[in-house]
Amino acid sequence: MTSKANIFNEYFTSISTAPDSILSKILPRFHMCTDLFIPLLSIEPLDVYHVLLSLNPNKSKGFDNLPNRLLKNCAQSLATLFSLLFNFILATSHFSTAWKIASVIPLHKSGSLHDVKNYRPISILPSLSKVFEKLIHKHLYSYFETNNLLYNRNSGFRKYHSTTSNKKSHINFSLPKIVVAHRELCFWIFLKLLTKSFIPPFFSNCVSLA
């Protein structure tokens, strides 16, 4: 088992690169889009309770060995305790190092089960770190949405957005420009579709667009 783990470890580390320790600490300069600051975050027990209830009990447990099923079943009893813990983290700006450790497991994609290249790594984070992350995400997402700081054609990881809405937005944005730039081509395509779809067969022979 150890030899298999080492083989996967060597392969996964060979196909990924860690960011430079110095450059990763330098943040780029951002243009200020708003003068409004993010309000001070205070995590309430009710918020923690709802997040705990939303956990998938069938998900694997992480490095903390806390299964989601336990957290979900004991949500009412743990909500207040965890809210105190999370608020302490925010107040002290100290995030536990143990919560940054991920358990990496290989997931088979396709092909031979004996070829290490047919696997991809899946990182399983500690359950409590994911609960904390969801609470922070809810607060930040609300701030971005309220102040219109998200790009209006960005559909990734947003509520009520999907690949369909992204395509629709792209078409609505690009189509008028394409029509203006290629009016003759668009007119030709329109007539071609019209002859195939709307004009009766005995009329279509009279129109030659080839």
Image (cartoon, helix red, strand yellow):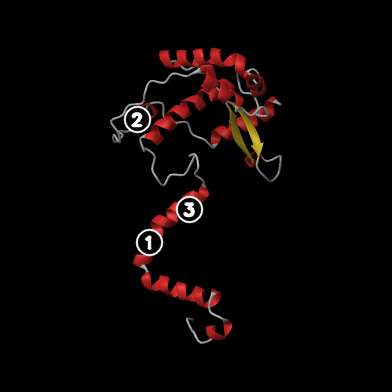
Q: Is residue 63 above or below residue 156?
A: above
Give the amino acid type for the residue marked by disc 1 in the picture.
Pro
* Tag shown at residue 27: 2
Give the amino acid type for the residue marked by disc 2 in the picture.
Leu
* Tag shown at residue 145: none
Q: Is residue 7 above or below residue 186?
A: above
Disc 2: CA contacts within 10 A as few (<14), some (14-19) or many (>=20): few
149 sits to left or right of 123: left
* Tag shown at residue 176: 1
Q: Mark 3 — residue?
A: 167
Q: Secondary structure at mark 3?
A: helix
The image quarter containing residue 6 is top right
Identify which residue, 46 or 67, lies in the foreground: 46
- From the image, state whether disc 2 or disc 1 is nearer to you: 1
Identify which residue, 59 or 148, lies in the foreground: 148
Disc 1: CA contacts within 10 A as few (<14), some (14-19) or many (>=20): few
Residue 134 in percent (x, y) is at: 51, 27
Residue 126 seen anywhere in this rendered image of the structure: no
Disc 3: CA contacts within 10 A as few (<14), some (14-19) or many (>=20): few
Which badge, 1 or 3, is on the more N-terminal residue? 3
Give the position of the N terminus as an image quadrant. top right
